[in-house]
Amino acid sequence: MLTNKTIVLGITGGIAAYKAADIASKLTQAGARVEVIMTESATKFIIPLTLRNITGRAVVTDMFELASEFSVEHVALADAADVVAIAPATANTIASLAAGIADDMLGCIVLATRAPIVVAPSMDVNMFENPITQENLSKLKARGFTIVDPAYGRMASGKVGLGRLAETETIIGTIKQMLGRNGDLAGKRITVTAGGTQEPIDPVRHIGNRSSGKMGYAVAEAARDRGAAVSLITTPTCLPEPVGVEVIHVQTVSEMREAVIKATARADALIMAAAVADYKPKSVAKAKIKKDSPSLTLELVRTPDILAEVKGNFIKVGFAAESEDTIDNARRKLQEKQLDLIVANDITSPDSGFGVDTNKVTLIDRDGKVESLPLLTKREVADKILDRVVEFLAKKPPLQRIEFSLWPPSSTERYKRINIPEDVRHLFPEDKVPFLIETDIGTFSVCVKRHENTPSHIHLRRTNWFKAHPELKAGDKVAIEVIEPMKKYRLKVGI
Ligand code: CTP
């Protein structure tokens, strides 16, 4: 996703400036065009030549320097940026950005750009915690800057606290999230499960499986990079937590079940990549089981099938890890668990399945379409799955539809009252809280009201929408559709 993207990387003068070389290097390796701007003090900590060699591009160090293609017109760089990232950002730079000062190239670009701006502070703990710095950061946040919080640890001064520059992966993850904010999953909520569940036997042992979590994490990151709000429900894994994703830690099937039910209450899609135990010990020993008998029998009982059980107005995607009859077994699971899509993989192949970074899968959907994919990275597989989720979401019927008839065009009424039946009232915001209704010509702001003698209702004004549909006659049915409770509503004709 970084390929051919222009990332303007601002480096300011702190001890962590050397870490910007790593950020620039990883972004460049991922295919981004990295335009480095260094403040004068940054050049005291790391020399521009290092960054020039890493990025293969001229480094801007001064507004009046002539070597760079952008040196005369700083606005060109501001326009070219897909994301402006400042890492490390010193207290001084943060203060000057908060005040809108443009006395150097970086300040000019920040003011001139329309691209998202990511700021990764790095400074001494006391400077970071100082109310002035915190106030400046709050100001930047309020203006839409994205702050990558510093990490806790040892600083150059020897003190330990909050102030170390965030990890490169965290900063790059945030940049990716910004790049994907208008992607094809923008505004959607995706729940992903990952890893293998662990069912305790006694305080030190559990029944587990070989799932590494890599597939689920790849789906979560890919969904984030396409603009989705992602909840990742994960068992313990060795993988770093993805940035910009809500991570929910679970261990057992019953914890995962609870988390899935909660997260899917508002989800547009559930992608169940976790390897869930089918059996658990009937009882968990309170003390460590000792090896005092020659054999040991554990009685196991069935766990709930989360994917089969969980229901709602969301797209359901399951995985079928098989060692034989892959396609037939996957088809059966698709039907039994009422899925929209199942991802079947043959786990006996060494380059596919558990632990490895690649996967060879077949996608089977609810309409019977079978798509066998070549060997791909798990991230590529994740994007293929999400392509299908996007297709299904586009076809998804509304959760609820409130139909009403149009009033005669000759009517002098300026408003039409549309009653909200009590059984769907909970799908709308509270009384008098404004919300938007989308239409084919723009959005209207409305709110639900209730008077003593009237049920809950919305007043719909005669607006341009009615003018835009001259074909509508009195008595024609139109509808308010609830696409996502509390969030997305649509006014629709042609129902
Ligand atoms: N799954 C689940 N809850 C379970 C078992 C499985 O939600 N108790 C989900 C998995 O996350 C996966 C899909 O169901 O998305 C299929 O899982 P899999 O282990 O392949 O199949 P099972 O239904 O467990 O059937 P079997 O083990 O007999 O192959």
Image: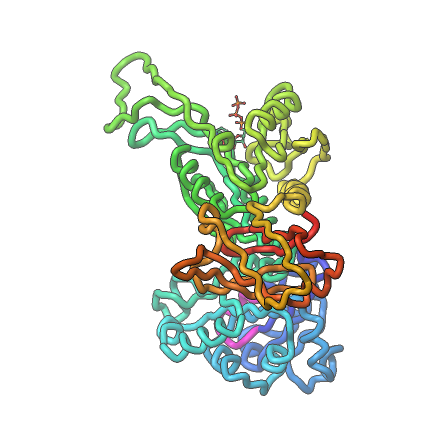
Q: Is residue 94 magenta?
A: no
Locate residue 288: give its quadrant.
top left
Q: Is residue 224 visible?
A: no
Query: Picture coordinates of residue 243 (x, y %)?
Result: 51, 55
Which is nearer the eye, 483 or 18? 483
Asked if residue 257 is positioned above or below residue 134 in the image, the reply reads above
Q: Residue pushed farthest top?
A: 294
Q: Is residue 303 visible?
A: yes
Asked if residue 337 is positioned above or below residue 408 in the image, the reply reads above
Asked if residue 75 is positioned above or below residue 350 in the image, the reply reads below
Which is nearer the eye, 210 or 115? 115
Q: Which residues are magenta?
A: 11-21
Image quadrant holding the N terminus, namely bottom right
The residue under the point 36% across, 76% down is: 130
The residue under the point 62% across, 64% down is: 443
On the picture, is 295 further left or further right than 32? left
Query: Picture coordinates of residue 314 (x, y %)?
Result: 56, 42
Query: Picture coordinates of residue 228 (x, y %)?
Result: 57, 53
On the picture, is 61 further left or further right than 87? right
Locate residue 361: give its quadrant.
top right
Which is nearer the eye, 469 or 134? 469
The residue under the point 73% across, 63% down is: 468
Query: Picture coordinates of residue 279 (x, y %)?
Result: 42, 23
The residue under the point 53% across, 71% down is: 145
